[in-house]
Image: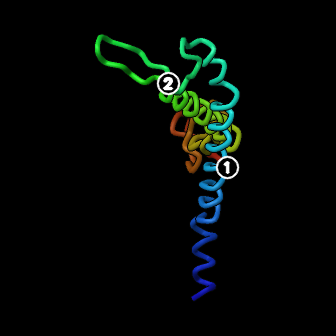
Amino acid sequence: MLREFKAFLIKQNVVALALAVVIGAALTKLVTAVVDDFIMPFAAALTPSNSWKTATFDIGPVKLGVGDFFAALINFLIIGFVAWRMTKLLVRDTPPDSLTTKCPFCVMDVDKHASRCPYCTSALTAT
């Protein structure tokens, strides 16, 4: 039973998924720290209150707290960009095997399992 469970974990990539979740959580904490401690202080210099967390946008009597939203947006953009780049690096598109081959006599596309060319009726060798 333990052997069967181990085979399930390996076959279904459960270990890889668990590792991805742990690394993703660590990356999220790292990006949040970078945004909060390095990027948003520059944004605070542009706000009148010098605090990006309390930055608001007033529309009449309504006050919209935009500081936390922009920090979350920057977090999302950085994590999304990193995930996209990692996916492009790790997941390569493999072209599908061609279902056709060229007839050596008339150079037309022929099914790769054909024994005769449907265009020139030449006998084709198995490849």
The residue nearer to you, when weighing 83 against 33, is 33
Q: Is residue 10 above or below residue 117?
A: below
Q: Residue at x 64, y 44 (%)?
A: 29
Q: Nearer the viewer, residue 4 or 115?
A: 4
Q: Secondary structure at mark 2?
A: loop
Above or below for 31 versus 25: above
Q: Which residue is depicted at the point 58% across and 33% down? A: 75
Disc 1 to disc 2, C-alpha distance: 76 Å
Disc number lying in front (1 or 2):
2
> Residue visible at 66% across and 18% down?
42
Where does the image place residue 51, in percent across and percent down from the top left?
Answer: 57, 22
| Residue for badge 2 | 54
- 115 vs 90, left or right, is left
Dots 1, 2 in contact, CB < 8 A: no
Give the amino acid at mark 1.
Thr
**Does any portion of residue 31 appear in the rendered image?**
yes
Residue 10 in the image, given as x and y percentages of width and height = 64, 70
Residue placed most toward the observer, 104 or 48: 48
Percent from the top left, x then y, of residue 2?
61, 86
**Which color scheme is applied?**
rainbow
Q: Residues within 10 Å of mark 2 (few under 14, many from 20)?
A: some
Q: Circle 1: is it few (<14), some (14-19), or many (20+) Cα within 10 Å?
A: few
Residue 103 appears in which quarter of the rendering? top right
The answer to whether one can see residue 103 in this image is no
The image's mark for residue 125 is: 1
Q: Could you say which quadrant of the image residue 36 lies in? A: top right
**Quadrant into which the N terminus falls:** bottom right
- If you read the primary sequence from the N terminus, does the residue marked by circle 1 or circle 2 appear first? 2
40 in relation to 17, above or below: above
- Disc 2 marks a residue whose amino acid type is Thr
Q: How many marks?
A: 2
